[in-house]
């Protein structure tokens, strides 16, 4: 459900980009025929469905953990000085592709947290629109079958007055030409039984030659398999939840489909003006349908018939009925190239998964009073004092809504009734699980904000998208855990063990860390945020850092000797006295950094733009 909501939202802007790109390509070749334009738009419609699905599903798959670090990669212990990273709202991700010698920085990807309520609303709207469209399509198909059943064959004497129809190639499918009193305009009904229906009233208003031209137009629909492509078009538009871009593509398909069939008629009769007069006469005298059918017909709107007549009478127009390879290939290349670009810059949309707690007997939950007073305890712990006493305790009456308390209580009961190690998207804010053994747990998308998890064992656990804001994680174990998109803002991580943990795109703004811990985190973290961090004088020799954000960080006198730094952002950071001797810096951003007092002796600098005024001596 969350994935569908994210796909629907991504499709809004991704499909709009696809439409703009294809529209520009087609306008670069104004003389290409309608058959080619139709083929280009049908490929674009398929891409409009596939691209959002592919780019969105990539964010709902868990990454593969890297191999365990070898003994040679282990780093000697360093200073245990506490590190405090100030809170910062902005989160940036810097990614790279290619081998270490040819790293290329990719555009910044926007991270969007989709609230669960918003996801539910988007999913509900999509389900209603899609369900309405599919039901309408099924009703329309059923109506077409009734029309087939009640239709009568065109009289033989009338058919004998249509020599071009009799000589026309009907294709592989047998096509029946019938009349019906239940329709207002001619229509080609295909799928499993090909039939062309002519309104009974049309035989009285048009001459046999004009009816013959209209019949050839409908035959072209069946020859081109427009009945099947029209059904596919309606299903894709329905699946996209009436996306404006998809609707626009559908309108272009309907127009180009009709113009292509007009070209097919002109190739058979060879006269433009009589056919244009025939369409004009139909537009003036026909009763316009109020309920369009899901089948290709000679026209559906007055605007469409007007555009078709203008194209018929345009001089020098390409009326070929075959596909033009050049423009079609160019449009396909444009669609593929844009899809690749979108796959790198598409926003990462995530939301907590929806879980249904098992029924809880009434006797397990006490009836709450309308207003509950609880005690809020504020604890200040001196840095590097594991057994420090409480420094300050305050009490404050706090109003807690009954609905919130019941929701949290029900969630905790649901977890307790299970093995206690599996809960996706649960609200466990403020729980006291200090010292628990939760090895190998799956807490994807769980809210652990303000929770007491001191000394908890979360090694080998899956914690993707977990929220640890302001949580007490002192001495917790995250060895070999999966940590993707987690938020450790203002959390107490002193003494926490991140050995060999898989860490990606996590936020550590305001978190309390020790220097030795930071080494383990930096070695395992990709795309993490350490902006505005106070890391001065730390020993980070030999670390391997990929895509981390150190903008505005205090890195004075930090020892990066022998380190490998790939695509890191040091913009506006303070690096006075930093030691990069023997280090490798590949694709790093040092914009706004004064490097004149930085040691780069024997360092290898690759793909970096260093302003001359800030360059090292």
Image (cartoon, rainbow, N blue to C red):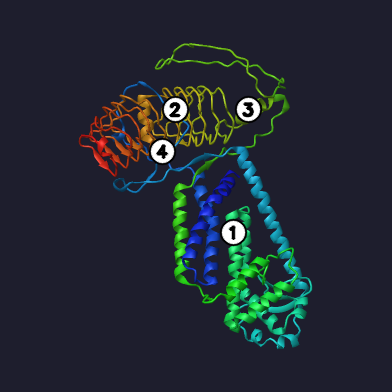
Tag in front: 4 or 2: 4
Report which residue position mark 4 lands on: 527
Q: Dot 3 lies on which element?
A: helix
Expressed as whole percent of the image width and height from the top left, the position of residue 229 reads: 60, 66
Lower position in the chain sequence, tag 3 or tag 1: 1
- Quarter occupied by the C terminus: top left
Image: 68 above or below 297: above
The answer to whether residue 174 is seen in the rendering is: no
Q: On the rendered structure, is 614 left or right of 490?
A: left
Q: Residues within 10 Å of mark 4 (few under 14, many from 20)?
A: many
Contact check, label 1 and label 2, Cβ < 8 Å: no
Marks 1 and 3: in contact by CB < 8 Å? no
Q: According to the image, label 3 marks what residue?
A: 408
**Is 405 displayed left or right of 437 in the figure?**
right
Q: Name the residue under label 2.
A: 477
In this view, the mark in front (1 or 4): 1
How far, Cα to Cα, is label 4 from label 2? 21 Å
User: Camera-side residue: 212 or 417?
Assistant: 212
Label 4, label 3: how many angstroms apart (C-alpha)?
32 Å
Tag 4 secondary structure: loop
Determine whether 515 is above or below 127 in the image: above
The residue nearer to you, when weighing 513 against 347, is 347
Q: Is residue 318 above or below residue 54?
A: below
Q: Position of residue 413 (x, y in %)?
A: 63, 28
The answer to whether mark 4 and mark 2 are in CB contact below 8 A is no
């Amino acid at each position: 459900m969350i994935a569908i909501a994210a796909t629907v939202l991504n499709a809004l802007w991704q499909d709009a980009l696809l439409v703009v790109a294809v529209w520009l390509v087609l306008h670069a070749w104004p003389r290409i025929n309608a058959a080619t334009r139709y083929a280009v738009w049908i490929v674009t419609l398929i891409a409009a469905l596939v691209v959002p699905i592919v780019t969105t599903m990539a964010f709902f798959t868990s990454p593969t953990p890297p191999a365990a670090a070898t003994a040679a990669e282990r780093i000697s212990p360093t200073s245990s000085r506490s590190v405090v990273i100030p809170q910062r709202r902005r989160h940036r991700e810097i990614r790279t592709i290619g081998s270490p010698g040819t790293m290329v920085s990719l555009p910044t990807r926007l991270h969007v947290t989709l609230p669960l309520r918003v996801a539910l609303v988007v999913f509900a709207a999509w389900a209603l629109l899609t369900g309405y469209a599919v039901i309408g399509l099924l009703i329309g198909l059923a109506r077409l079958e009734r029309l087939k059943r009640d239709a009568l064959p065109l009289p033989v004497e009338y058919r004998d007055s249509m020599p071009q129809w009799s000589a026309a190639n009907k294709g592989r499918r047998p096509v029946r030409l019938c009349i019906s009193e239940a329709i207002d305009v001619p229509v080609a009904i295909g799928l499993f039984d090909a039939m062309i229906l002519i309104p009974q009233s049309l035989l009285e208003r048009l001459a046999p030659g004009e009816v013959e031209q209209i019949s050839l137009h409908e035959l072209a629909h069946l020859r081109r398999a427009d009945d099947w492509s029209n059904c596919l078009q309606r299903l894709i538009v329905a699946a996209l939840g009436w996306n404006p871009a998809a609707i626009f593509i559908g309108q272009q398909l309907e127009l180009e489909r009709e113009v292509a069939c007009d070209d097919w008629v002109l190739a058979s009769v060879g006269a433009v003006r009589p056919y244009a007069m025939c369409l004009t006469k139909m537009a003036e005298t026909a009763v316009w349908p109020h309920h369009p059918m899901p089948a290709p017909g000679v026209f559906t709107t007055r605007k469409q018939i007007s555009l078709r007549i203008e194209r018929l009478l345009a001089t020098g127009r390409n009326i070929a009925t075959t596909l033009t390879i050049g423009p079609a290939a160019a449009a396909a290349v444009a669609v593929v190239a844009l899809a690749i670009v979108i796959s790198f810059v598409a926003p990462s949309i995530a939301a907590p998964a929806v879980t249904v707690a098992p029924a809880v007997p009434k006797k397990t939950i006490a009836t709450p009073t309308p207003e509950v007073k609880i005690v809020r305890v504020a604890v200040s712990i001196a840095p590097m004092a594991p057994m420090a006493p409480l420094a300050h305790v305050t009490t404050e009456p706090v109003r807690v809504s009954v609905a919130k308390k019941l929701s949290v209580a029900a969630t905790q009961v649901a977890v307790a009734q299970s093995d206690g190690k599996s809960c996706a998207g649960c609200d466990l804010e403020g729980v006291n699980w200090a010292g628990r053994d939760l090895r190998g747990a799956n807490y994807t998308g769980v809210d652990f904000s303000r929770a007491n998890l001191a000394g908890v064992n979360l090694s080998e656990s899956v914690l993707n998208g977990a929220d640890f804001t302001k949580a007490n994680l002192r001495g917790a174990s995250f060895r070999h855990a999966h940590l993707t998109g987690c938020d450790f803002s203002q959390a107490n991580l002193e003494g926490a063990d991140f050995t060999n943990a898989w860490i990606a795109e996590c936020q550590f703004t305001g978190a309390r860390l020790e220097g030795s811990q930071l080494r383990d985190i930096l070695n395992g973290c990709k795309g993490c945020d350490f902006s505005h961090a106070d890391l001065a004088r730390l020993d980070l020799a030999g670390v391997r850092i990929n895509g981390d954000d150190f903008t505005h960080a205090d890195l004075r006198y930090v020892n990066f000797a022998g380190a490998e730094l790939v695509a890191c952002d040091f913009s506006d950071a303070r690096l006075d006295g930093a030691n990069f001797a023997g280090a490798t810096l590949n694709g790093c951003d040092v914009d706004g950094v004064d490097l004149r007092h930085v040691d780069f002796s024997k360092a290898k600098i690759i793909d970096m733009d260093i302003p001359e005024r800030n360059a090292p001596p």
